Image (spheres, rainbow, N blue to C red):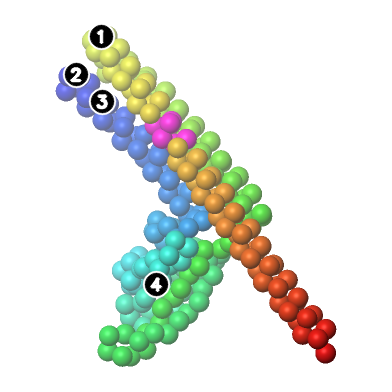
Amino acid sequence: MFNDYITAQIETFQKRMDACIMLFHYRMMNHPVKAEPAALMSVTCWVSGQEYNIEDVAIIGKPNDYQFEIIPKNENNLQNIIGGIAEVHPEFKLDVQTKKDHNDEDEHHLIYTMPPVNKERHDALVQVTNTFYEECKVRLEEEHTKYLDEIVNIFIDKPEDGNEAKEAIDQEYDDYKENAEKLRDAKLQEIEEGYLRYQEEGNAEEIDKQNHDVQFSMKFNTK
């Protein structure tokens, strides 16, 4: 059990590590395979000369893992919302649908579909994920090295406490490195699943086309 001062130093170190991990996670979420709400965190909309976060001007839903459904809170802001999302995520495919609200009046629903993970996008996502991971590892190592130097000065008059704090911080560092690796692996797995889904859908479309061609040929061959 650590004394309060050592515990305080460990908590300070954890906050630094948390910031590195959060940045890594946020950057990956901005390159989504599935419809991740975090991908919309950086989207803002200008309304009447004032900038708003998208959740302030729209209701955000997720009908499935690969789509957002966004309903403007005010129909007058429709184009502002479309423009804000297009600026951050031009790769999202937009379908504007008109539905009836509870007053039986028309309202617009913006259906955004995540782009398919074809071979080109698969390779790009793998590359950017690995790049973000390597950059996260560098940040973690830099913060670890920097804080160990600080620990020496903090506990200069209490070397035993300093050694205890160093061992605890080393363990925390190892845990955060493992966490970053798990996040990377989970993202890479998500990319592979998206690529497999794309391939399966492509095969299904090809089978449908082949069946159509066969039926078309049979139709004329019976004459």
Which quarter shows the N terminus?
Answer: top left
SS for tag 4?
Answer: strand
Which residue corresponds to the image point at 33% horizontal and 16% vertical from the top-left? Answer: 167
Residue 34, x across and y down, in percent: 48, 58
Q: Mark 1 points at which residue?
A: 160
Q: Which mark is residue 70?
A: 4
Q: What residue type is labelled 4?
A: Ile
Which quarter shows the C terminus?
Answer: bottom right
Q: Which amino acid does label 2 sit on?
A: Met
Q: Which amino acid does label 1 sit on?
A: Glu
SS for tag 1?
Answer: helix
For the record, the magenta segment spans 176-181
Q: Do tag 2 and tag 3 residues touch (Cβ < 8 Å)?
A: no
Which residue corresponds to the image point at 44% horizontal and 61% vertical from the top-left? Answer: 65
Q: Tell me if residue 158 is in the magenta stretch.
A: no
Q: Quadrant of residue 16?
A: top left
Q: Earlier in the sequence, mark 2 or mark 3?
A: 2
Q: Which amino acid does label 3 sit on?
A: Gln
Q: Name the residue under label 3.
A: 9
Which residue corresponds to the image point at 56% horizontal and 40% vertical from the top-left? Answer: 130
Q: Is residue 193 visible?
A: yes
Q: Which of marks 1 and 2 is nearer the N terminus?
A: 2
Which residue corresponds to the image point at 31% horizontal and 85% vertical from the top-left? Answer: 101
Say few, some or many: other residues with alpha carbon within 10 Å of mark 3 (under 14 / 14 to 19 / 20 or more).
Answer: some
Q: In this view, does 148 lie above or below 15?
A: above
Q: How far apart are marks 2 and 3 (CA)?
A: 14 Å
Q: Which mark is residue 1?
A: 2
Residue 158, x across and y down, in percent: 23, 10
